[in-house]
Amino acid sequence: MDDTLIPPLEADPMKITKVDVILMNMRPADNPGWAPILCRVYTDAGIYGDGEAALAYGNAHRAAFGMLQDFSKSVLGMDPLDNEVIWEKLYKSSFWGQNGGPVVFSAISAIDTALWDIKGKYFNAPVYKLLGGKMRDSLRCYASQLQFGWDEKKIPAVSVKDYVANALKAVSEGYDAIKIDFFTFAEDGHRLNAEETTRILTPKNYDMIKRRLAAVREAVGDGVDIIMENHSYIDAQGAVQLGRLAEEYRVLYFEEPCTPTPKMNKFVAERVSVPISQGERIYTRWGYAPYFEDGSIQLIQPDIGNCGGITEAKKICDLAHIYDAGVQAHVCASPLSTAAALHLEAAIPNFTIHEQHVYCRYDYNRKLCIHDYQPVNGRFAIPDLPGLGNELSPYCFEHGEIATVK
């Protein structure tokens, strides 16, 4: 072979020089618990990459903010192209990484996603190309969490008319699939608590859910898929009740029907014919394996921002493919996580549908990145820019709480 055709090896590999860890303590009036955790990883080659720890909701954002700072110290001086090497180091050398939970893996996820962004920019290629190439040019997506409305701010759906109006608005925008948690708000408008949602459903609550689901199905017709969300609010017995109701109204799949543990998931799956999905609170391939082995999950929903990043999410999806399980990445974060999900879903054979969360319509999220990717007629194009094809906006650095690790 002609030596002139062989590109020279880099004498000195790139090195990570510092990491900005950013907490966006936004606290909007309609969503006071919302606090995205982001990062930017810098290199001595002038290339940087952005990532996200997708724990912006719930009560873990401060923990993720601290964990991400700790892990950032461990990657300084390393080659950002060595994502597998870095992943294994964070997993094995942190002690809590093995069999870890969302805080540990959200921090790994943020760094790992930033590394893929760097890698794409370095090779001047979009991430999907580095994952093996696009299997599709656009992604079918659904309008997600319509119990919060389908507007520019969160508006709880209370009456049956609210659910129907939200569904019809999404369908009018071209969506042929929608997702609703019919059991988030009571008919008087208050958010249901654990005492009201656990154990066997009361006739009153069962009837409320049935009336909402029946009205939405009648309004949108048979040509629109309905996904029934449950957020694991109820126990397995109640989940079976709802699963059998979902069968009656031809629900596409039943998401988080019960506490995300293999045995309880299997209990529900064996008693209903609707496909079961789980994943936003399952972390790493080791967490998913029992569900595949017992056949209790038909569609997985790994969140790239807390399951271990793009490196780990791809492995989870490949494992799911062995068991004929479909994939819908869980997306409830900034536009950065949306871009990461689009790349992954474009590159895997077992993609099913993409989640377009109602939060993606809110201005306080849309301004976090320089690009605002949104679907058209219920389908998403795949970013073609190098890396993730999106990055954090100046707003994050002007308004976020920043901890610089160097």
Image (cartoon, grey):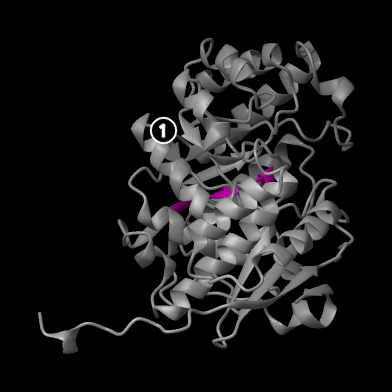
SS type, badge 1: loop
Q: Is residue 367 above or below residue 60?
A: below
Q: Picture quarter containing residue 305? A: bottom right
Estimate the x, y position of residue 270 in percent, counting from the top left: 51, 11
**Residue 144: within the magenta?**
yes
Asked whether the viewer can see residue 119, the reply is yes
The image shows residue 42, relative to residue 375, as above or below, that is below
Q: Return the x and y of residue 60 as percentages of the image width and height.
A: 82, 48
Where is residue 117 drawn, in percent x and y?
Answer: 52, 71
Horizontally, is 155 left or right of 245 in the view? right
Within 10 Å of the Cα at label 1, are there few (<14), some (14-19), or many (20+) other Cα atoms?
many
Q: Which residue is mark 1?
A: 325
Please give the name of the residue rendered at 76% of the width and 43% of the height, measured from the top-left corner: 157
Residue type at mark 1 is: Ala
Whether 45 is drawn above or below 327: the answer is: below
Place residue 242 in its image quadrant. Answer: top right
What residue sits 58% from the left and 33% below the top?
287
What residue is at 59 percent from the left and 73 percent from the top? 372
View extreme (left): residue: 1
